[in-house]
Image (cartoon, coloured by chain):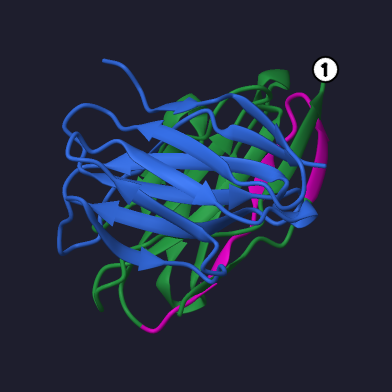
């Protein structure tokens, strides 16, 4: 069974540009989560999509946005890039939203974004 | 909102030493608890999880964790570490009610095991 895939592996941009990161979840998973992993800060939650809808977002400015497509893949867009956006961006997927919150997340390898 | 605290940011051990990594959380309701591991050059993977039942849970590679509800803790343990356990370890907590089931992660603990 294929795991969560992310592309590109590395992305280098300059300040002010826009970045688009992509994620394909495990087959059968409808929820996709995006996290930012900056050095020494652990994983900071960015966005959660389920069944094509944005369900929750973390404490990030509106220039971080995304969407989920009908095939459950997802895009994360970061506009007006700033130097501090340099980080590893992780995507995770899980089975359908359940009331217990017992969703085990499966992570992709991440996209390393460097802003110069 | 919940928060997770991992007390040890960096741990250095020799092979065969015992390991205990601390994890405390703050949240008033019931939670699911996770430990994830990130080996060098690999992606994050689940080590073990607690949803309900026996508070002592066993995971892969000889790891175990104990949920102590009264202390809001979920410490990770391994009796004898190996060089291959060198990795970054993350504790995560997810509420089971209230509408937001997003796990909150701790800042991680970097473990280095010397051969």
Is residue B27 one of those drawn in magenta?
Answer: yes
Residue B60, percent from left and from top: 44, 29
Q: From what the image shows, is residue A29 above or below residue B73? A: above
Q: Residue at x 71, y 28 (%)?
A: B86
- Decide which of A79, B23 is in the foreground and name it: A79
Q: A53 or A116, which is in the foreground?
A: A116
Number of marks in picture: 1
Instruction: Examine the structure image and report whether residue A78 is included in the region drawn in magenta.
Output: no
B12 relative to A85 in the view: left or right: right
Q: At 69% from the left edge and 45% from the top edge, which residue is drawn?
A: A87
**B9 or B68, nearer to the observer:** B9
- Residue B70 lies, with reference to residue A52, above or below; the image says below
Residue hosting label 1: B115
Chain A shown in which color?
Answer: blue
Q: Is residue A97 above or below residue A60?
A: above
Residue B25 location in percent, x, y?
A: 52, 71
Other-residue count near label 1 (Cα within 10 Å), few / some / many at <14 / 14–19 / ≥20 = few
Q: Quadrant of the N terminus of chain B?
A: bottom left
Among the chains pictured, the one given green colouring is: B
Residue B22 or B31: which is nearer the viewer? B31
Residue in view at x 65 percent, y 56 percent? A80
Q: Looking at the image, which residue is at 24% across and 74% down?
A: B99
Q: Is residue B51 visible?
A: yes
Please report the bounds of the magenta region as a residue range.
B10-28
Residue B55 shows up from this direction: no
Element marked by disc 1: loop
Quadrant for the C terminus of chain B in the image: top right
- Subunit ID for the residue under disc 1: B
- Residue A43 at x, y = what percent? 58, 53
Q: Quadrant of residue B14?
A: top right
Residue furthest bottom in the image: B28
């Amino acid at each position: 069974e294929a795991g969560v895939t992310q592309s590109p592996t590395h992305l280098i941009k300059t300040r002010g540009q826009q970045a688009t990161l992509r994620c394909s979840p495990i087959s059968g998973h409808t929820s996709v989560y995006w996290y930012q992993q900056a050095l020494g800060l652990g994983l900071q939650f960015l966005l959660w999509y389920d069944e094509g809808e944005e369900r929750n977002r973390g404490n990030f400015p509106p220039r971080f946005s995304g969407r989920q497509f009908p095939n459950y893949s997802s895009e994360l867009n970061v506009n007006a890039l700033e130097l501090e956006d340099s980080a590893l961006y992780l995507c995770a997927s899980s089975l359908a939203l359940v009331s217990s919150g017992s969703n085990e997340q499966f992570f992709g390898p991440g996209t390393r974004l460097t802003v110069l | 909102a919940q928060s997770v605290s991992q007390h040890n940011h960096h741990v250095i051990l020799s092979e065969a030493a015992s390991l205990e990594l601390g994890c405390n959380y703050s949240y008033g309701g019931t939670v699911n608890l996770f430990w994830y591991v990130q080996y060098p050059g690999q992606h994050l993977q689940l080590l073990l999880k607690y949803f309900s039942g026996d508070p002592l849970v066993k995971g892969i590679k000889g790891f175990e964790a104990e949920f102590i509800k009264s202390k809001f803790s979920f410490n990770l343990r391994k009796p004898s570490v190996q060089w291959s356990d060198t990795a970054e370890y993350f504790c995560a907590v997810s509420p089971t009610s209230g509408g937001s089931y997003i796990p909150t992660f701790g800042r991680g603990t970097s473990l280095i095991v010397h051969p």
